[in-house]
Amino acid sequence: MQDENVQSEKEQPQDSSEELLRQLRDKLYSESISIRRKAGYHLSWMQEDGLEILKQVLFGSCPKKTKNAAAYGLRSMRGRMRNMAFDVLVEGAESSDKETRYVCEHALAIVVKKWPAKFAQELEKRMGKVEIREITPKRTSRKNARRRVR
């Protein structure tokens, strides 16, 4: 009798957490942006399970709005999951899917401003530093230059 009670107590929290994860996953597909963002934020507190769901949404065939909510959840990760979330965003920035790449690049731009400088250095190592060059103006002949002055 006591063994059955112990087993039912152990199963109940797992069932409730699975139910909560399912509800949050469903809320990511909501029509309301605030509900989607809140679901992404709440999933960011769910450690590995939340990371897995956010990663599935980000790399799945979901609408761009849903991917934005998943990226928001990844940006909101805290503690030991922050580095894993950063790796997922970098992986998404290198993705072949155009929407996923755009969402992840935008999220990384926000992350680099928000998080410590070490992420900016690591991002430059992984993605390569983009070199911005000056555009030299076309040279005009002296004859044309005189005509413009007059």
Image (cartoon, rainbow, N blue to C red):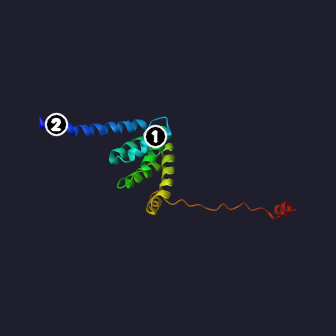
Tell which circle, 1 or 2, labels the residue nearer the N-terminal end.
Answer: 2
Packing grade of label 2 (10 A; few <14, some 14-19, many >=20) is few
Q: Residue at image x 49%, y 34%?
A: 31
- Give residue 2's quadrant in the image: top left
* Residue 91: mark in rendering: none
The quadrant the C terminus occupies is: bottom right
Residue 53 visible (yes or no): yes
Three-letter amino acid code at the position of disc 1:
Arg
Q: Residue at image x 44%, y 52%?
A: 90
| CA distance separating discs 1 and 2 | 37 Å
Pick the front one: 32 or 82:
32
Specify the farthest residue to the right: 150
Packing grade of label 1 (10 A; few <14, some 14-19, many >=20) is many
- Give residue 10's quadrant in the image: top left
* Mark 2, residue position: 5
In this rendering, the answer to whether 86 lies above or below 53 is below
Find residue 109 and report its horizontal and vertical position in percent.
Answer: 51, 54
The quadrant the N terminus occupies is: top left
Q: Residue at image x 27%, y 37%?
A: 15
Find residue 41 and report its horizontal and vertical position in percent.
Answer: 42, 46
Find residue 58 and report its horizontal and vertical position in percent.
Answer: 43, 43
Q: Nearer the viewer, mark 1 or mark 2?
A: 2
Q: In terms of secondary structure, where does tag 1 sit? A: helix
* Residue 36: mark in rendering: 1
Q: In terms of secondary structure, where does tag 2 sit? A: helix
Residue 59 visible (yes or no): no
In the image, is 115 to the left or to the right of 9? right
Q: Residue at image x 84%, y 60%?
A: 148
Three-letter amino acid code at the position of disc 2:
Asn
Find residue 95 and report its horizontal and vertical position in percent.
Answer: 46, 47
In this rendering, the answer to whether 119 lies above or below 95 is below
What is the count of numbered marks?
Answer: 2
